[in-house]
Image (cartoon, helix red, strand yellow):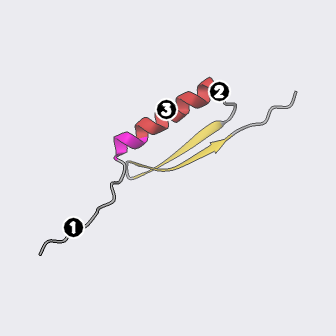
Amino acid sequence: MQTCIEQKSTPKKTDKLTKLWSIINSLVTGEFTGYIKLNFSQGNLGKIEKFEEILKK
């Protein structure tokens, strides 16, 4: 008797960083006016926070 257990594939560190880099590039081309805070935990990307400033004219 053989059982098949489906495992969830978790994104690898390089996949996460590649996706982050593409998002940062899209923000730069879209004239993003804030800042991004990256929190690392034991060498891994833990939390990403985006803060955008609203400029008054």
> Regarding mark 1 in the picture, which secondary structure is present there?
loop
Instruction: Where is residue 14? Give x, y as percent.
Output: 35, 40
Which residue is rendered at x = 70% and y = 39% of the image?
52
The residue tagged 2 is: 30
The residue tagged 1 is: 4
The residue tagged 3 is: 22
Query: From the viewer's perspective, is the residue at label 2 or at label 1 nearer?
Result: 1
Structural crowding at the residue carrying mark 1, measured as other residues with C-alpha within 10 Å and reported as few (<14), some (14–19) or many (≥20):
few
> Which sits in the foreground, 27 or 3?
3
Amino acid bearing label 1: Cys
Which residue is rendered at x = 70% and y = 31% of the image?
33
Q: Quadrant of the N terminus?
A: bottom left
* Mark before the other along the chain sequence, 1 or 3: 1
> Regarding mark 3 in the picture, which secondary structure is present there?
helix
Q: Which mark is residue 31?
A: none
Asked if residue 2 is among those painted magenta in the image, a careful observer would answer no
Amino acid bearing label 3: Ser
**Cα separation between marks 1 and 3:** 36 Å
